[in-house]
Amino acid sequence: MMLSVNKPPAQCQHPSLSAQSEISPLSKRARRNTKSWKEFVVQNVNHDGKLFGLRDMFGHGFSDSDALKLNNCRGSQSSAAAASSSLATTRCIGTTTANDNNIDQRAATNKFYTLRMEHRQGGPLAKHRGEERILLFRSDRAGIIAKIIFSSEPPENTSKSVHSKTSVDVGDSSVDDDAPNPHFGTAYAKIHVLEVKSQYRGRDLGGLLFSEALSSLKSRYCNDDDWGDNPDYAEVGPVKSNGCKRKDLYNVECMLDAEEDVTRYGKLESFYQQLGCFVKCPKRIQYVNNNDTGTYRKIPMQINLRPSTKSVSSLHQERTRLRRQRFFHLTSYKRSFLPVQLVGSLGKLTVRSHAGAEVLKMDWLATETSEGIQFCSTHGHVLLATPNGSVCALTPKDQDNNDCNSVLDCDASMLNKWTLFVPCRASDGSTTTDVNDQSRSVSTKSLWALRTCHGTFLTADPIRQTLACTRLPSFWQANGSDISLQCTSDTPSRRHHYRKCTQLQTYDYVLSMRSRFLNFCLGGATLFEALGWIHAFPAHPFRVCSPYECSKPSSSPSMRTFCFLMAETARDTGLPDWVQLIALFHGVGEAVKVLDPSNTGDMAESIYDWTISSRSRIVGCKIPQRATSSFGEFRPLNVDEEDPRFNSDIGAYQAHCGLENVLLMWSGCEYVYYLLRHNHATLPDEAFAMLRYFLLVDWHAHHDYSSLTNDIDDDMLPFVQEFVALRRRVKLSCVDCGDLTDHQCNFLWDIHYANVAAKYNCDHMFDW
């Protein structure tokens, strides 16, 4: 059922819309009590006095009997990478294999672990000439979890391995499948094995090993960064201008056989094509049987690596060499790392390349250093926060940029600082003395801010879903169960509120609050007077603000402004006048803090402000599994969870008794509902349902409490849902709008809302 009626004429606008209201003493007090982000984001070191690290952020989700748990990673992955076979990408599941039975005893006490990579050459296990192996290990146990085995050798006749007569730019060793450069000889390489254990798939670890193998080949045959540094080239080759020997450069043709299950046709082939490989046309695809029940396609593929022949000055050559050296030192994940997904509300976040030409969606590897955390991609990109406030991915190609004004030409130590993000833990009101299991379960979704060396914070653009920086902290939830960092709209103050709300709002608490406030002996006042009082309280009480904004009396709209804007939006949309009246009065519950300042006001400041409109639930029965959005981790703090009277779906109530006969959490809107009933407001039942149930998100959005609702509630549901949609639209549109003045509010009341209030018997002196 829709509420729309004929749209009224356009409303009159008062000429002084830009003026600001006077600052009352109560408003000043409320603004002083508004906390800035600096009061929450103060913890950047742990109990040992060291910067927070990966263990502090993700250690709570690890289990000594689980694998890396990457199968539940959020965000969209490319279909090729996600569905490829064991020779390609990696996805981890929460189970172990037979080989995992040999777990090191340390794992029982050290549940957190990282991955490390080793590069080995030759040895007694080598089966091929010039064989190299890149291996991945877990830090807490023996055994390889992923590996790539490849071999290479230069041509026996090195007479073709000469340099071009023109100067060689060491920077452009790009991956290319064009014809080989005639100035260089050709070296041949082959990838024999690329394997990742099944429980470690899903984070492109196969792509990481493949990229590392290509980097090794490029460094050996296509780049001459190590002129004069490597003694292997001291006796041969042309001489550089500084007297150092120059090593020979080669074209590289690297072959591999992509062997994929025929039931996953084209998945592995697509995976390698995304890495730069192409199918060798002269070769025929073979179908083989590996003595099992499956049939496989064996696809010959190739990737070519080329040295550069660009003619550039020696100054540019030296600049590019220095950039490559800096870039090599940035990729510190070669020591140890943790695969981490950076996700937003719609999945994996993207980031622009340093050149700005590409928008990249990548898998990240987080590395802990003594100065912060660094994020590198599986293909060698480095996340960089620039001084101008942007965030970009420094790609391997960026090291070849010969722009004299490039950001890469800054001091190496400075460039390294730009890649570091310092984790700052945000307090949610928990005490350091809470060490029981309940407190540990609550801490699993604590908030973190990632601060850059420029004083900004890493965030996610909610519209473009790209990484960016912001002057105010943006908060992330570190999820150890799927190793992800999710940018959230949650804030420490909101989290603190819901923590206290879940802990205090029990069945007995609600009964005590009803006994205290529903005798309506606080005093007398009209609803319009109450609107003037709530001007002292912000419409966005959980918003993160700077210390300067907290000191400004009009830095954000007040609750009174929000109520008038919501009523005006309902009026302009053509909704009935009783909807406009509920929109106008639904926030006046905060006026109780003015009528009862010695008790309610102090309680709100020091313990828990129940007058703030926050998501509600039914007390006296089992809390729904979704636990009213994202705060299910606080459920163990509620003592009713252990009370057998309230452990069922109906709890203390009769089946299908109707929402009118249950107890909701005690809130400002719940108080206003009974206030209107007590003072004989003649609003329709739909208006009362809107007022009381719009905060009951589990019911109107997720259809929980079906064992308690009845047919009357089903009839009211469309009205409540439309009111919720109206409120959400206005809430989003008035984040930074100006505050209405007293004169403007009086004007709107006099020309319209006074008559509507009189129509529904809401204009007289109310007992509060």
Image (cartoon, rainbow, N blue to C red):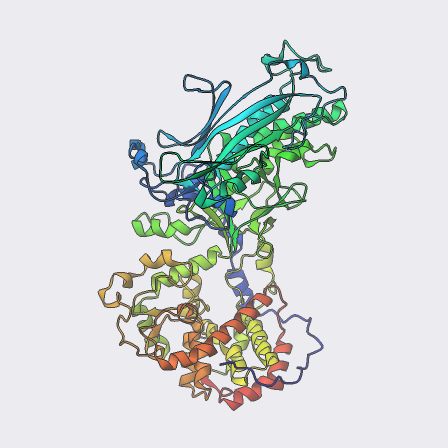
Is residue 768 visible from the viewing direction of this image?
Answer: no
| Percent coordinates x, y for residue 766 in the rendering | 46, 84
Residue at 60% x, 54% y: name it: 464
Name the one closer to the observer, 707 or 458. 707
Q: Is residue 197 left or right of residue 639?
A: right
Residue at 54% x, 70% y: name it: 559
Total labels: the figure holds 0
Residue at 64% x, 46% y: name it: 389
| The quadrant where residue 733 appears | bottom right
| The quadrant where residue 352 appears | top right
Is residue 720 visible from the viewing direction of this image?
Answer: yes
Task: Return the residue found at the far top.
Answer: 235
Q: Is residue 52 left or right of residue 99?
A: right
| The quadrant where residue 538 appears | bottom right
Task: Return the residue found at the far left.
Answer: 644
Is 564 rendered above or below residue 295? Answer: below
| Percent coordinates x, y for residue 2 in the rendering | 51, 80
Q: Quadrant of the C terminus?
A: bottom left
Name the one closer to the observer, 73 or 387. 73
Residue at 47% x, 18% y: name it: 122
Name the one closer to the observer, 515 or 29. 515
| Percent coordinates x, y for residue 459 in the rendering | 56, 50
Q: Is residue 120 left or right of residue 175?
A: left
| Percent coordinates x, y for residue 578 in the rendering | 51, 84
Name the one closer to the observer, 673 or 254. 254
